[in-house]
Each structure stands twice: as C-alpha cells, then as structure tokens.
Amino acid sequence: MTPRRIVVDPSAPDPAALAPPAAALRAGRLVAFPTETVYGLGAAARDATAVAAVFAAKGRPADNPLIVHVADVDAAAAVVAALPPLARRLATRWWPGPLTLVLDADPALPSVTTGGLATVAVRVPGHPVALALLRAAGVPVAAPSANRSGRPSPTTADHVVADLGGAVDVVVDGGACPVGIESTVVDARGDVPVVLREGAVTREMLDAAGHSAPAGTAANDAASPGTRHRHYAPRCAVALAATGDGPQRAAALAAQGLSIGLIGFAAGPPAVRTLAVVADAADLGRRLYDGLRAAEAAGVDVVVVEACPEEGIGRAVMDRLRRAASASPAGPRELSSD
Ligand code: TXA
Ligand code: MG
C-alpha cells in the first residue's frame, strides 16, 4: 500500500493543503514531513498508541527515544519540566533550526516517547513546511527520521515511501531537505552544552556564540541511546576513501572486477559509476544519504565515498560516513591511500 502524498511548495506551503495532515496527526495517525535536516515520521507526542506505531513502522528499538518537534519556544516549554538559562539562550539563537535540546521532561509525557528516560529531546525545525504543519496541528509531534531503523535517513519523500510504504498514512512532499543530515543534539541541562550528536549547528558555531562545548565530548551509551544502534547503512558495502583519493580507490576496486559506485569531489573513470560529484562538506552532507540509496539502486558491490575535512559541518558528515561504512555488509573498510 502506498501512503497518500500531499505535494507542497517548500518555501510557501498552502495552509489549506496542510490542514488534512495536521488533522491526521491530532487523530493519532502517522504523517511523514520534511524538515531542513531530514524527513521525520511524526505522531502526536502525547498519544502513546500513535508513538508506539512509529516504533513499529521503523522497527526501532524501544530504548531509543524520539525528538519532540514544536512550533516555538512556548510550545517547547510545555513538554519539558524546565527551560534553564542555557537552553533559553541556545533556543533564542538557533530556533527555528537544526538544533535539538535534551532537557528534563514533563513527567506527563508518555514513557514510549522518552524511551523511559527522565529527559526529552525537543526542537523547533527551520523548514517552512514543518513549521506550518506544527502550527496547524497545535500539538507536539514526536518524529524520528522517517527511515526503517538502521537505514540511511530520508532526504526526499520518495526515500520515505521506499522504506515505510503503507505504514505511514500521509507523506507531505516538500522536495529535498536542504541540510541532508540530522540535527545537532545537545544536552542543555547544565552550564555548558554537551554535544551528543554532531550536526549543522557546529562546535565552531557554539564556540563563536560563547557556548563552548567541552571538546571531544563522546556520545556515550547512557547519554545518547541512539549512538549504540546500527546506523545509516545501505544494502551495498560502503568504503571510505581519503580526501582526494576517491577516484583512484574506486578505479582500483573496479580493476578487481567489482561493480563500484563513487560519491566524491571529482568524477571517477568510465569503469566507475559516479553517483554524485560534490563541491564541499556541506554539499556532501546534503547528498550523502541520497547517494547511498542511489548506490544500492544501481546494484553496485561497493560505493566509495570520499572523506571531507573534519571541521564545521564536516565533522557531522564524517560521523555519519564512518557509521555507514562500519555498518555496511563488508564491515569497516576505511581505505587510506596506501
Ligand atoms: O534532524 C533530526 O534530528 C531529525 C528530524 C526529523 O528532526 N530527527 C532525527 O531523529 O534524527 P532520530 O530519532 O533519528 O534521532 C534522534 C536522536 C537519537 O540519536 C536519540 O537517541 C537521541 O536523538 N535522543 C532522543 N531523545 C534523547 C534523550 N532524551 N537523551 C539523549 N538523546 C536523545
Ligand atoms: Mg534516525
């Protein structure tokens, strides 16, 4: 079964077009929608039955909590126990935008939404369609990325339909997501932000705004449940090549008789299927998940992805890339130039 698809203008969505999906959310049904990062699979966050259906549709482990999406800071305040000063400052600076804050949860939130934790992750997305839908729905919306658990996150409505099909009632199609990788997740309960997942709000940006996050803060199991699960893997093997070495590595693997795809900063030779030529780290982030899905659709044995410099958003991109490579069927395959 295919879900109902509602196509909207990503920059100026028609409120009338969003009324049915907003009503579906209020009625406890599942609605996929675009955000500036990736597509989310939404359900009313206070409706335990609806949220349980999200876990079932994704095949997601019950101990991995969801991000609650709201339209503004006031709506965020309603799903947390308190908005401490640091959280208010971060929200003022980056909402709406790709920043998720982990805070003490409103105890009335269903435990299925919070994965049984005393905290909740909350964000105000920056995409006009997501914001308009949240305003129209008038309820907080729990939404993980709208992929089957362990798969690359969806950056188009087609990716959502390919992974979830009839498990979702409505897909709001607002085109491709402009950022392409998931939001930065920050624990904002203390005096300094603790980065649990890197994203488009970078450490450099936090530093520049006077919110220096402790360097090298590792996302550990207890702090960020999602980090212990398999992630971002397409059905073909993923090999990570050093910056500048993508075409050569791809050619060398193709010479071994393998069918090879390439996502990198330059096109490969004719023996290699070049899937995406990217301009910089942000562009790689925007096109990575689509490129991985294109690789599996093309039926290649291995997709070679060229590393980007690990600064700014490049850190988040490399985090996703390493996880995709280590979760791929061939296991970890970080190819250096030797
Ligand atoms: O950009 C995004 O964040 C997208 C869009 C749809 O908003 N959503 C997304 O959700 O990536 P998901 O469920 O795929 O990833 C949420 C991450 C997981 O790593 C999860 O473990 C973490 O946030 N998380 C959720 N609640 C948490 C909490 N209370 N404490 C720590 N980490 C939490
Ligand atoms: Mg996800």
Image (spheres, rainbow, N blue to C red):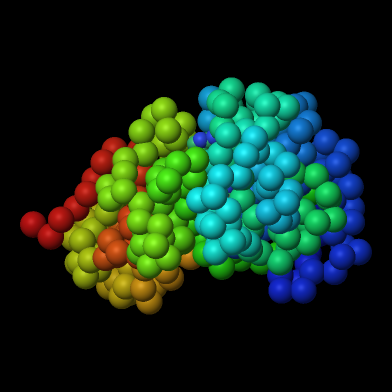
Q: Name the side, left or right, on which 136 lies relative to 144.
A: right
On screen, residue 17 versus residue 208, left or right, reads right
Q: Where is residue 227 in the image (x, y as percent from the top left)?
A: 41, 36
Along the line of sight, the residue nearer the viewer: 208 or 289? 208
Which quarter of the picture shows residue 207? bottom left
- At 41% from the left and 52% from the top, the residue drawn is 198
Quarter of the figure with residue 13: bottom right
Residue under the image location 53 percent in, 30 percent down: 64
Q: In this view, does 3 lie above or below 304?
A: above
Residue toward you, 68 or 119: 119
Count of numbered marks: 0
Residue 286 shows in the view: yes
Image quarter where the C terminus lies is bottom left
Q: Residue at x 53, y 41 (%)?
A: 102
Q: In this view, does 19 lie to the left or right of 293?
A: right
Extreme residue in the left direction: 338
Task: Report x, y in % for residue 261.
Answer: 36, 60
- For residue 146, say whether it is visible: no
Image x and y of residue 293, in percent: 49, 54
The answer to whether 122 is drawn above or below residue 89 in the figure is above
